[in-house]
Amino acid sequence: MRLPFSHAAILLQVFNNTELNGPGNAAPESPIPFVSQRQTPPSPAPATSGVINFTPCPPSTGLTPNIGLECANFSVPVDWSDSSSTQIKLGMVRLAAQSPTQRIGNLFFNPGGPGISAASIVNAIANRRQNFSDVIRQRFDVIGLDPRGVGLSAPVRCDSNVSNAIPPLLDPNDANSLQALIQINSRIAASCRNLTGPVFDKVDTISAARDMEAVRVGNEPLNWLGQSYGTQLGAQYASLFPGNVRAMVLDGVLQHSGSTPSQLLIEQTSVESTLKKFFAASSHDPQSPLAGQDPATVWANVTSAAAAGTLKARGCDGTPATGCLANVPVENVVGGGRNMLFFEFAWNKQLGKALALAHMGDGIMFATGLSTGTATDNEGFAFNAIACQDGIETGQQTLAEVQKRALVSRTFATVPGMNEFWRTKTLCDGWTPAETNPKKQLNVVGLANPVLLVNSINDPATSVVWAQGMNDEISGSVLTFRNGSGHTSYFIGNESKKAMDDYLVSLKVPAPGTIFQS
């Protein structure tokens, strides 16, 4: 597995170690009838008719029992343009509103990725390992619908024996290494297609947005809280069905348009600004594992050791038995390091600790990367499948094209290859599904209420530049900022979180350009 760090794992690790504010919520009151009276489907291919019946989640889901969480399935066509195409089952969970008489509606939540299971994060919310505000829990049924290819919804499955046998080759520098990378990616894609079935070639975001409309229940207008990739999913839904949206929050905004060089530079700038904030914070924090050292120098030494092949991971032997790599490649350090920047309050426990250990010769916290078993629905495989169909150029890239891409990154980046767009493009070279949702500028009009956009100023994954671009693409939207670092704001903010809550409940939007201090 060559996407070394799972976004979902980072999220859940933080959730499990975060002290929550406020008392725990009481268990939900009596269940609320949840019946779909669907309107005309959004394409010629109809979804399976009938109601959505929520029942206690079975053990096979892996979700926590007896916490008020309910599960349901809903069938949709693999191909929305073909009425005779195979049907797949989408899986979703519901956390019922705690104040039924004050219920506003359903709040669909997507934590991003792509590839993170919304059901798993709503499960964490139900367990109070992370929280939606009490007012949200009281007024909304929180719905975690896993997009097609993810989690409970016909997940992408790939042969881990194929991916585990492959060394990381994220920076091919000659024709032979490029051809090896293309062949490797093609082999992975072929194994995924074989194990996943026909949905593998139809996991693009447009298809997922049409699924959302089919699932939208009770003819209720959509309430949406999307983070990271979930902002793209929400925006593309709004472009298709603007009249069906009541409220939409896009938190950590992804822009699905722009040229490859601009995407590389925009994200790299955002990653590096956040990394510099981490260096500054670590050098002034006596509690930091890097206290008394120059964090930038530590980072340089660790990445150099990894690039030279000398960074070891104790207790790892490079086999699925340990699930981690004996020799930590530089791709794991830069990719894992970027993801460890997501939550500023956890910098010491995550990136600070990881660098301190690695500087002493143990790269264990950067060493994950192996899948176990013969097949897996690891988030990284879903990430590849969705991203490569969502406008990342696939097929036979020439060496000149790859070197041009690398030149842009190296010229303008302190840490070449650290941003996600770079890694995604490289992992899509030779990926075989056709591009089904090419990058393009949206023109979202006809919404009943403004869309609220929130972005941290130093976000290592979604730049404020993208947020400003989406502000232009969504007519009447309101863009606000959180004056801080980290990826997204709802689970790590205070003022910004309250603004999102107020908007979802009362449709009250802040003044455009508001900068929240937390």
Image: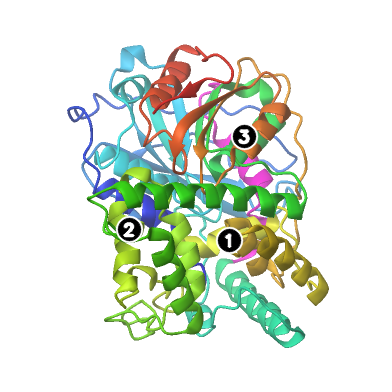
Question: Is residue 31 found left or right of 8 in the rendered image?
Answer: left
Task: Give the spatial CA distance, label 2 vs label 3.
Answer: 28 Å
Give the x, y percent position of residue 350. Answer: 32, 57
Q: Say which of marks 2 and 1 sits in front.
A: 1
Residue segment shown in magenta:
197-221
Q: Is residue 59 visible?
A: no
Badge 2 vs badge 3, beta-carbon distance below 8 Å: no
Return the mark for residue 467: 3
**Amino acid on which the number 3 mark rests in the picture:** Ala
Circle 1 sits in a helix, a strand or a loop, which is it?
loop
Q: Residues within 10 Å of mark 2 (few under 14, many from 20)?
A: many
81 shown above or below 315: above
**Amino acid on which the number 1 mark rests in the picture:** Thr
244 shown above or below 216: above
Q: Is residue 250 visible?
A: yes
Q: Which residue is mark 2?
A: 352
Return the mark for residue 414: 1
- Of the numbered discs 2 and 1, the one sitting upstream in the chain is 2
**Amino acid on which the number 2 mark rests in the picture:** Gly
Residue 144 located within the stretch drawn in magenta: no
